[in-house]
Image: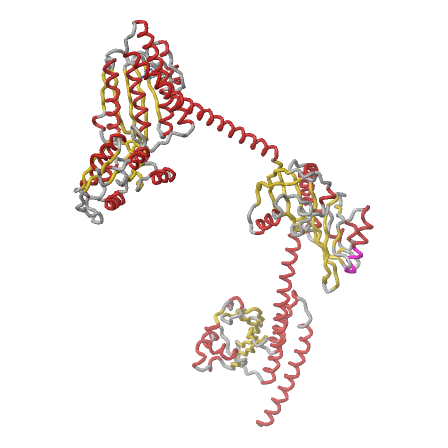
Amino acid sequence: MTGTYGSLQDITERKHAHEFENEMLQLSPQLTGITLPEISSALNLSLARIGKFLNADRAYIFEFNTAVTEMNNTYEWCNDDIMPEILNLQNIPTKDYPKWMELLLRKESIIIPSVSDLPESWKAEKAIFENQQIQSLIVIPMFSENQLIGFVGLDDLKRKRNYTESEVNSLKIWSSMLVSLINNYHTEKLIEESRQNFEIFFNTIDDFLWVLDENANIIHINNTVIERLGYTTQELEKHTVLSVHPDNRRDEAARIVNEMLIGKAEFCPVPIITKSGNLIPVETRVKHGYWNSKPAVFGVSKDISKIQLSERKFATAFQSNSALMAISDYFSGEYVDVNNTFVNILGYSKEEIIGNTSRDLHLFSDTNLRSEIIRQLDSGILVRDLEVEIISKKGDILNILLTADIIFIADKKCLLTVSLDISDRKIAEEEMRKARLEAENANIAKSEFLSRMSHELRTPMNSILGFAQILEMGDLTPGQKKSVNHILKSGKHLLGLINEVLDISRIEAGRLSISIEPIKVSGILDEMVDFIRPLSIQNSIKIISDYSSNLQLYVRSDRQSLKQVLLNLLNNAVKYNKPNGLVRIRVQSIQGESKDNEMIKISISDTGIGISENDIPKLFMPFERIGANKTEIEGTGLGLTVVKKLIDNMGGIIGVESTPDQGSTFWIQLPAAESQLSILQNSDIQTDESLESLPKKGTILYIEDNSSNVELVEQILTYQRPGIHLISNMNGRQAIVLAIEYRPDLILLDLNLPDIHGSEVIKMLKNNPETKNIPVVVLSADAMQKQIGNMLSAGANNYLTKPLEIPAFLKLIDEYI
Ligand code: ADP
């Protein structure tokens, strides 16, 4: 029975297998050679036919993502009254199907005749199947190039079923048919996407794009053609491309298009024409290729109307420019074009220039100029307003300001130079410079002359005054006495004039040597007040020194100049005062923004005749006496001129405030200085162990007129060398007497002394056998190398500059004592 039953079953099976094969054969042509939109329906159809044929409840395709971490139900067929599951089966994690995936990855089919009989190892999958009420199922993996891409399967919900071996084999064939269909679908989709991208790109380009067939008929165009030419696609497609070229140039276009079609030409300069008849200048380039598998020509037409416009603008600017403009080949240097100015100014014709280099024409005095410009441009340095000499055809040398830039003319790298002819400006500048120099020289010569003349006049004046004084002492008649008095008075006046002219001209000729040093204001004022006191007593004027609270203020100035300034101002304050008047001297410190800007103001006020507002500007002009020449008051009108020049020379300022009939205040301001002594006291010198106090014994003579400097040296010695005895004197000649008398071990010498210059002192010391061996060290604020050299060659043993560096000063003393 079993056998009969078996063979009967075999026959049924064979018949069924045969029918299944037939079914597949019928299906197969429907699954090949189909287009993209047809693929989805072919897949659905094939699921339905196989599902129905095998009497399954559900047939489906699942696809994996590339990493095989998720699966998606992409196609599904369901038998009548079976609920579709496709929407529930999206983005399913493969890790929820461990056993399932294990088999599929091993390329094994999964055949489950009875879900309820699944062993424990299928626990996870079993729960899911039962949830979907699946009783039995079959699943065949889909592989493409050894990569698991998905599976196809059939479910039974109403019964348990076992698939025969031949059914399984047929299903495997079916699965591989589906794989190629799915692969096709994906490639077609990619192609379609890139075709769409290409179309978008094609249509967003501003250039006109054409696809032509082998007969120059238009097959495809982009939106730019439609929009700018005003035709519809139908009006252009299948028409010859010659129809978009103007009638009068159609022959030329036809010739070029023909050459393009056979690959002999790639470029066409003929413009195209809009439907309404407007010309658009274009440059067209073509390439050969395939369109829809047929040979085609691809054309790109570039609208060059903007370029043409800017070219026209450039050409106009180039030709009519008043600067010399030239374009040359960047590498060979050969001129490509030059403008009219270039031709007119240099005298060459255009033909003589073009094709030659600047070197050929010997244009630049500096033959390496061009290569230097290229070098700079290559390293990214701008070439702007280079002052250059250029030589014309006639050989004239012109001065130009040259600017260079890189430009491209139709792909060719060129050098554009723009040059301004500045020869006239150069000549004018040179003339101005000469004129200024001449004027300066003339001024110096004038001052030199005045200075010499005043100097020469002084000697005879001295003897005139001297002899007049001797005459005055003799026995004279009253008439003679009066005459001699006249001589003396006029002579003194003349000497005053000569001295002041000498001062002014010395300052103007720059021959007044000054040495700026800290000067104690109260000290120098006291000195000057003492000087002026006889005159003030004579005129019954009281001088009030109102600076007792500011005794420690110092200014930076030249001692001699400051004395002369103060003396002049005090002298005027007494001279132009009223009988029993007052002169008040005040000193104050004016704080600047920083400590370095602090100034010291010295004011000298009088209770005299005052000066009207109109006259104030005249005060500092030479020979301006503002009515004082009509009075008895003696003067030259030069004093304040000298004062102003001296103050300017020291970097100070001078001013005046006055009320007529009530009095005037003349003030000066000079930069404040810190006293050397206070620097010493504030420094750590007294505790500085590197400067040990030595038990030296000896005598030093210090020739110096600045009492604060003397005080400073005294302090240093008291602290550091208590055994040394210091003698000081402010007067050069007197100091020499002291040197002979005391034979000091060392002489310290300042250069600007009231009576004679320090160099004279050195000379006198060195010429005297009694003093010539005493070492002399100059202490001066003058740090000019020339001065130092002069003093050392005059015989000084050493030269120290002020402000003193105390350690160096002590070292030097130790050397000599
Ligand atoms: P001098 O005193 O030799 O005339 P200055 O150059 O010193 O020359 O002064 C110029 C003029 O300024 C004086 O002639 C005088 O008229 C006026 N002056 C100068 N100082 C005073 C002063 N303190 N009060 C009034 N007038 C003055």
Instruction: Say above or below: 544 vs 600.
Output: above
Front residue of 591/769: it is: 769
The quadrant of the rendering that contains the C terminus is top left
Name which quarter of the figure residue 402 lies in.
top right
> Does residue 235 appear to the left or right of 115 in the view shown?
right
Measured along the vertical axis of the image, is residue 63 above or below residue 231? below
Q: Quick check: can you spot residue 527?
A: yes
Q: Is residue 591 visible?
A: no
Check residue 261 for magenta coloring: yes
Judge whether 51 appears above or below 591 on screen.
Answer: below
Relative to the observer, which residue lies in front, 34 or 754? Answer: 754
Ligand 1 is in which quadrant of the figure? top left
Residue 159, x across and y down, in percent = 53, 79
**Residue 327's spot in the image, x, y percent?**
67, 45
The residue nearer to you, when weighing 229 against 441, is 441
Residue at 36%, 9% in the rendered image: 630
Q: Say if the magenta span includes residue 509.
A: no
Identify the main secondary structure in magenta.
helix
- At x 32%, y 21%, the residue is 568
Q: Is residue 657 left or right of residue 23?
A: left
- Give the magenta range: 257-263
Q: Could you tell me residue 582's position as x and y percent?
A: 24, 16
Identified at 81% across, 54% down, the residue is 255
Q: Quadrant of the N terminus?
A: bottom right
Q: As displayed, is residue 372 above or below residue 467?
A: below
